[in-house]
Image: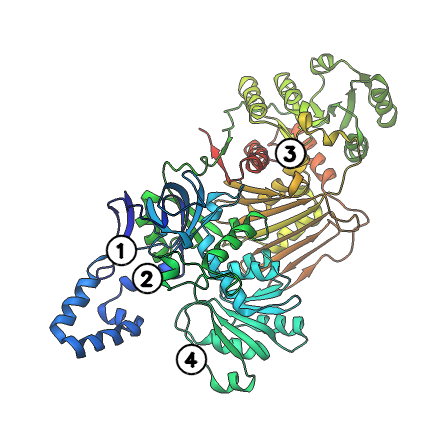
Amino acid sequence: MKQVVQNYKSGELAVLDVPVPGCKPGGVLVRSAYSLISTGTELMKVSEAGMSMVGKARSRPDQVAKVVQSVAANGVPATYRKVMGKLDSYTPLGYSLCGVVEQVGAGIEDVAVGDLVACAGNEHALHAELNWVPKNLYAPVPDGLAPRHAAFGTVGSIALQGVRQGESQLGDVALVIGLGLIGQLVVQLLAASGVRVVGADPDPARCTLAERLGAAACGDPASAAVETAVAELTGGHGADQVYLAAGGGSNQPVELAAKLSRDRGRVVDIGKCSLNLPWNAYYEKELDVRFSRSYGPGRYDPEYELQGRDYPIGYVRWTERRNLACFLDLVARGRVDVEPLVSHTADFDDAVETYQRLKDGDLKAVAVLFRYPGHAGEAEAPAVAVPAVPVRASAPSRSVQSPVRLAFVGAGNYATSMLLPHLAQRDGVALSAVVTTTALSAANAKRKFGFAEATTDLDAVLGDKSIDAVFVVTRHSSHAELTRKALLAGKAVFVEKPLALTEDDLAGVLAAVEESGNDRIQVGFNRRFAPLLREARRRFGARSGPASLRYLVNAGRLEHGSWYLRQGTEGSRFAGEGGHFIDTASWLLGADPVSVYAVATSGNQDLQAVLRYPDGSTATISYVTSGPASLPKETLDLVADGKALRLDDFVRASVYGRKRWVSSRLPKARDKGQNAELAAFVKAVRTGGPMPVPLESLVATTAATLAVQAGLAAGTPVTLARTP
């Protein structure tokens, strides 16, 4: 089997072929599915290995003290041989994984071959294809929890034990210093237990992530923002607990902890940072300093860890194993979300390269997973194809003097309330025909908006060469087929979202583009045309670093009997209108997404979709139907490069940076961009110029919307695979 190892003397990292460990009594042999790189602890070890001997000695004074004792007892030559022999040996890496039980040792009755387990321990949950794990260092994975998420079990237990040491209570205010992997988990655990959290980290991206995952406020510890936030939340009294989740040699964390703690507050050390306590500050407040020992009670006790002797629950409620099981349960029930922490997933064979990229800073990550080949714990992550747009012919230009003649297929509520009122008043537009399946609805549309003709004969309208463009405003299930027919008839097409409900439908539309040479399509993604949002984007300006975008959509409940609820034929609600929000996010971020991860509440009433972009940006779309009617329907926040953009339901926008801009007055009505979108479409048809949104973008947004549904079904992230 293969295992990741390091030579501490030379710093060499390697993936070695080593013997398969035996399955001893009291434990199980586990084939790894995913293992987690601790970007704090493990990278510190990797970095130390690359130091000179003097550097190693400075970084590990505890080991130097042992060497001095050995010299006194055994002499210099013997000690030298012992130390060099130990340094010049391969040591393992890793301590948190999820895998499948391959063999069960004697005395084990709680799991069977084929079961999925999360494993802990720097001697038993290694970055290796197979590990022997004793009973008290594994826990069964709850049904429905993805193996990649269960691989966080050990680091989650470390964070959980730290929170337990803080003894937080409902309504407390806590400060978390250091927002790396452990710090992010501590933030979520505290927020889930009713604690208001302030985070401190010099990395603005980590601060943004922590706020998205539940922190009330975050900021650079060197700025006044953290102190201000703690003061506001506590009425000036100070934090009830401070959790030190930072690393390094700086004494700033313990000094900041003393400054921002309340009188008789608790300071919990979880990470490995300098602890040169300023005596006066800690004495005057009588601060309670506590240490959190790794995964919990049982750690470093060989009788517990290796011999399987449990502590009675009446005396020790939370042991290593019980902490591990508790954290897995929290993730499975959605109380903790680890997916946003995954910055990168690498194949196990690429382990050396991945460590080197992390060490060199080429890969900036909160958490990195190794994915093992051939494991049976999880199906391969699904992918949704993003078809390449075929080579097209250019559309001929029209004379600007002649009106653009339009036909509408469908005349329902959206068409008659949001589209036709704008078009009926627009110069240079002629409403030529309206097609519906019932005669009366066509007659009503003709009377209200002045169509020249009302009919139920679609083929006749598509065959009319005087008609320049067709609007498809029917039920979702018919969009792709009607768009395909209109393209083949040589018409420009404006199709309301969605363009397609399945990958096959999307492929059919693109096949019509290739067959006809006609690429004149616009999908009704109107938000990117909203004047208020466009002005806010202009004020925000260009960015250089990755961005974090959050979009809350309070969709509300539908009336009983609405055709939107017919998921069997019309797709889910999000499939129908989710493209609006994905398109808006992609337009603001200037790229198309490369992967999607989606989770939903029971019954799929509310869902969250996390989209990742090529430059490392993320967009989280929360689509909820359980919110109150009084809550605004759409709110959006975009944060990058020390700047922020906020949109409040298309009635107010703000940009925060070196200067603050707020939209000067509330508009008379919410303008979500329909009028500007229609103007751009009509202009493109009249002039023969490019369509308002490139077809490649429309296809990518449609594929991403489909990927949300695929991800919900699979319970795993979905890759958006570009096809040649």
> SS at mark 2?
helix
Query: Of marks 2 and 3, which one's residue comes earlier in the chain?
Result: 2
CB-based contact (under 8 Å), mark 1 and mark 2: yes
Q: CA distance from mark 2 to mark 3?
A: 46 Å
Residue 481 screen position, x and y as percent: 64, 20
Query: Of marks 1 and 2, which one's residue comes earlier in the chain?
Result: 1
Report the amino acid beneath label 2: Lys
Number of the label disc, if any, that sits on residue 575: 3
Residue 156 vs residue 340, the one in the foreground: 156
Label 2, on which residue?
A: 45
Query: Of marks 2 and 4, which one's residue comes earlier in the chain?
Result: 2
Judge the density around disc 1: few (<14), some (14-19), many (≥20) Cα neighbours within 10 Å.
many
> SS at mark 4?
loop
At a point 23% along the width and 67% down the height, the residue shown is: 52
Judge the density around disc 2: few (<14), some (14-19), many (≥20) Cα neighbours within 10 Å.
some
Is 271 placed above or below 630 here? below
Report the amino acid beneath label 1: Gln
Label 1, on which residue?
A: 6
